[in-house]
Amino acid sequence: MLSCLFTSCKDETGQYVEQLYTNSEKNRAVKACLKVSADSAVNHLFKHNGFYDMNDYRIDFSTIENTVFDTLDKYGKSDLKDSLILLTNRMVEGCGAQLTPLIKKAIDTLEIFDAERLIKGAENAITRYFQLQSTSYLKNLFQSPISIRMNVLGINNLWNEVYKEYIKHSSTALNFDVQNYVVEKVLFNIYNEMEIEEYLIRTDSTHRGSELIIFK
């Protein structure tokens, strides 16, 4: 209820403020938040050492570290492991131009069912919603450009060398999809960076443009 006394008014419920924005404006604000967050993620990640020099973001093949990489280390083939990690990260760092329009496409086609709930939600509510709704779609979109770059830079051949050396000394075969692993790691890192920017949008007015003023 909006209570007024002479020239003083007080919004006791918040309903008046909510009514300042239409559902369409709230939907635009959510997508604007995603676009700003995605731009921030791209700028931070897709540059030299954006992945490799960041421990939390480096593509380190940790899922096979205790099997394949330990075996390589044991038999003096650590150089193959190191080359695979470095080359894969450099490959991904150079993917910004190919992946950026795909992220924007996913944001543009995203269906938003309750923008107000997302705007009023947790500090990462919008990014988490995007992650939930778009991960499968983005994984499919990312496969082709990452596959092309992996082939061009010889990462698949290098992985075959790594696996060949591993299997020389192990009787345990390994079913590991290198490309899928890389795609999932890239997406995981993008979402993490988007969450950081979403938090700043919610808490720091300097990170808001005109469409993001709803978050004040």
Image (spheres, helix red, strand yellow):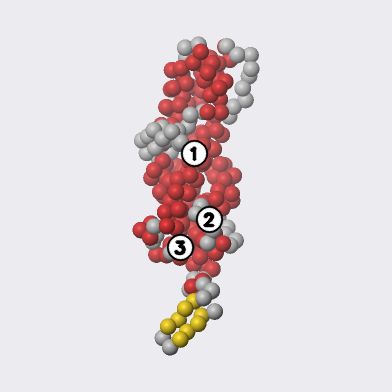
Q: Quadrant of residue 152?
A: top left
Side of 156 relative to 201 (left or right): right
Q: Residue furthest right?
A: 172
Q: Which residue is mark 2?
A: 122
Q: Quadrant of residue 112?
A: bottom right
Q: Which residue is mark 1?
A: 186
- Image quarter in which the C terminus is found: bottom left
Q: Residue furthest front?
A: 5
- Image quarter in which the N terminus is found: bottom right
| Whole-number angstrom distance, CA of label 1 to CA of label 3 | 28 Å
Tag shown at residue 215: 3
Q: Amino acid at mark 1?
A: Val
Total marks placed: 3
Earlier in the chain: of badge 1 and badge 3, it is: 1
Side of 40 relative to 163 (left or right): left
- From this viewpoint, is residue 130 visible? no
Mark 1 neighbour class, 10 Å CA radius: few under 14, some 14 to 19, many 20 or more? many
Tell me the residue at 59%/51% (across/down).
133
Tell me the residue at 51%/41% (across/down).
187
| Whole-number angstrom distance, CA of label 3 to CA of label 2 | 12 Å
